[in-house]
Image: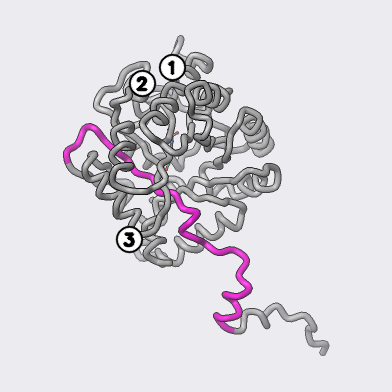
Amino acid sequence: MKFPEIRPRRLRYNEKIRKMTRETQLSLNNLIYPIFVSETIREKQAVKSMPGVYQFDLDSAVKEAMEVEKLGVPAVILFGIPREKDPLGSSAYDDNGIIQKAIRAFKENTNLYIITDVCLCEYTDHGHCGIIKDGYVDNDETLKYIAMEALSHSKAGAHMVAPSDMMDGRVKAIRDSLDKNGFTHIPIMSYSAKYSSAFYGPFRDAAESTPKFGDRKTYQMDPSNRREAIKEGMLDIEEGADILIVKPALAYLDIIRDFKDCFNVPIAAYNVSGEYSLIKAAAEKQYIDEEKIILEVLTSIKRAGADLIITYFSKTVANLL
Ligand code: PBG
């Protein structure tokens, strides 16, 4: 009987040595917490499909932001639910819109790093991420409005903008508009590989952004495609993106790894609503150990190559670490 000479188990002997040799460390520094701010409610309201997640009115949103900051989470990404929706998503680029107000209020009350989701779907009455012409989302027409929205968020004081509409050329349109208006210092974190995914279901409850007709397949990516993600990432880098997002995260860990290997900018992953709700539902039934699963899942997203993780679990992780 020949005994093994190389024994990986030596470095698993106890928690001390395991910790010393751990390759991937989850850190609060890398987490971004999504917050939904609504103009249509007077107090915070639970999102049914996402236990622990709320829509906030402005006041309760500020309270939430202060709590998030106290827990040590460095950044938030904001989503708005406006009072008025119309075909052109006008409240998205209204300097007195709900997000613009929230940015100002957050900056007055916290030192959080404020990122805004730049998209039209929460603001259009048809629920699509762009302007509709003849039943089709018109790419180049949409770019103008997306750029206006990013500019309006920057004027209100956003630290970073994150376009999630998936129109071709939006990063360049936003960069041009920000630069022309004195916002050369505002980075763009682009949802580069955003797949047309069933994992967004619960989010659309939270953001009230379900499309009224059709689906998002003419602009979001087909889940079967891997090389196309690289093409999207390349285009966004050429157009001036500072950070690239892969979304969703768990079913797309290969894409996160591809991005990490192909691009020398920070990579972010969006641990989306459906990924959150799956864990919450299973935990409620006590099928799984919620805390352990959360840490394992987020660590695996980081191990796959994500520098930053946008996650509804940020507060939970802050309490765990
Ligand atoms: C679009 C947007 C979506 C998400 C963030 N921004 C989804 C969509 O296409 O409807 C999804 C986030 C999540 O599921 O947590 N503005």
Question: The residue tagged with tag 3: helix, strand or loop?
Answer: helix
Q: Quadrant of residue 38?
A: top left
Query: Residue 240, position in %: x, y?
Result: 61, 31
Classify mark 1: residues with Cα within 10 Å, few (<14), some (14-19) or many (20+): many
Query: Residue 267, position in %: x, y?
Result: 58, 46
Question: Looking at the image, which residue sits at the far top?
Answer: 134
> What's the residue type where badge 2 is placed?
Gly
Q: Can you tell me whether the CB of the residue at mark 1 lies under 8 Å from the nearest atom of ligand 1?
A: no
Chain-order first, disc 1 or disc 3 = 1
Q: Which residue is mark 1?
A: 131
Q: Is residue 8 left or right of residue 273?
A: right
Q: Pick whichever, 225 or 35, lies toward us.
A: 35
> What's the residue type where badge 3 is placed?
Glu
Q: Which residue is mark 2?
A: 89
Distance between mark 1 and mark 2 Cα atoms? 8 Å
**Residue for point 45% across, 11% down:** 133
Query: Residue 246, position in %: x, y?
Result: 56, 42
Q: Disc 1, disc 2: CB below 8 Å? A: yes
Task: Work out whether 232 lies above or below 64.
Answer: above
Question: Looking at the image, which residue sits at the far front?
Answer: 182
Q: Which residues are magenta?
A: 14-42
Chain-order first, disc 3 or disc 2 = 2
Q: Pick whichever, 223 or 40, lies toward us.
A: 40
**Residue for point 61% across, 47% down:** 256
Q: Which residue is mark 3?
A: 284
Q: Pick whichever, 167 or 180, lies toward us.
A: 180
Distance between mark 1 and mark 3 Cα atoms? 40 Å
State which quarter of the image contains the N terminus.
bottom right
Q: Is residue 287 magenta?
A: no
State which quarter of the image contains the C terminus.
bottom left
Distance between mark 3 and mark 2 Cα atoms? 37 Å
Kindly tell me whether residue 123 is visible in this rendering. Answer: yes
